[in-house]
Amino acid sequence: MTDAFTQWQADFRPLFDTKARQALDPLLAEAPARLAEAIHYGVGNGGKRLRPMLVALSYALSQDQPLPAPDSAFFAPIWPAAIALELIHSYSLIHDDLPSMDNDDLRRGKPTLHRAFDEATAILTGDALQTLSIELLARCDAHEPVRLDWIRDLAQGANRMVFGQHIDLNANRFDSLEHLRALHRLKTGALLETAVRLGARAAGNARLDELLAFIAPLGLAFQIQDDILDATGTADRLGKTPGKDAAADKCSYVTLLGLTRAEAERDDCLTAATAALDALGAAADPLRALAAFVAHRTH
């Protein structure tokens, strides 16, 4: 399954980029040209596309369809939700990079949006992406109950992500691992949880309990690996500035636990995530492969 999933990922990313641009273009018909350019820059600036992939794979698992081709008609119902979620994620990165937040110059190996354009344009781009995500879902042709669930789930996930970001900005030190976990269940985990909710909603909420049990520890594994890469990676490999946690005296899994214990904590979270899929058998193999990718990625 690993080779098949790797190819599926490789096919999914450019297809997602094409569909996202196709979805945005009509919504931006009246936008000022420079702002539209900035929005496309912020959304199209590469990335793992992890959250849209989770929407698709959760939808497929909920219908016992392990790994349909990304461009198959099977996935047609979930593209609006997958794109809307990535618009929210893109906005969060644009604002996170601002001088008043993490103050970074690089994102995915390219200038952050406020460096490529200007700070005011970056703020407005993030503002627009939030409302564009809701407009996209409001206009889509999903059945009314599903569409309303999607809008609610997206709004709740975005709010929880913002709550986590606020906590992170206003407390540099935590006195326990549990406090750090609680922070990242919001800041990192909220949109990952939203992804599996969106996919399951479109399939009548089948497998939602199993998916939620899977994504909670996987979200922590994702963040721990981020912290490990910040401590050990290079700008060329990461596509962003490394070493920022230590430089800012910021609490992370590495600064709190040390590198070896952080790696062990990451592996424990990965084990818990995959264990949540045990009852689903081979149908969950794509999610197992995705989990391994998340926990051991190099960027």
Image (cartoon, grey):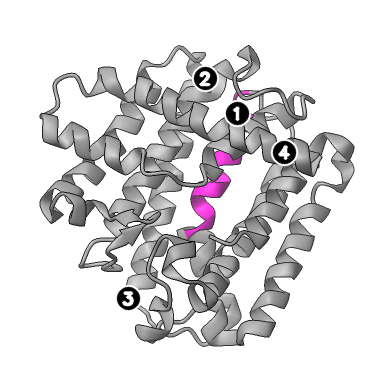
Observer-side mark, 1 or 2, equals: 1
Q: Secondary structure at mark 3?
A: loop
Q: Is 150 on the left-hand or right-hand side of 270?
A: left
- Residue where numbered disc 1 is placed: 201
Which is more toward the observer, 118 or 162?
118
Kind of residue sitting beneath label 4: Phe
Residue 272 in sight from this viewpoint: yes
Quarter of the figure with residue 11: top right
- Residue where numbered disc 3 is placed: 170
CA distance separating discs 2 and 4: 31 Å
Q: Which mark is residue 145?
A: 2
Comes first in the chain, label 2 or label 4:
4
Q: Is residue 83 above or below residue 245?
A: above
Quarter of the figure with residue 38: top left
Q: Are marks 1 and 3 in contact (CB under 8 Å)?
A: no
Residue located farthest toward the front when viewing the structure as drawn? 236
**Residue drawn at 83 percent across, 55 percent down:** 275
Q: Secondary structure at mark 4?
A: helix
Q: Quick check: is 22 in the magenta stretch?
A: no
Question: Looking at the picture, how far across and down is residue 82, in whole percent?
Answer: 50, 31
Q: Which mark is residue 279?
A: none
**Residue drawn at 60 percent across, 87 percent down:** 258
Comes first in the chain, label 3 or label 4:
4
- Residue where numbered disc 4 is placed: 5
Span of residues in magenta = 188-202
CA distance separating discs 1 and 2: 9 Å
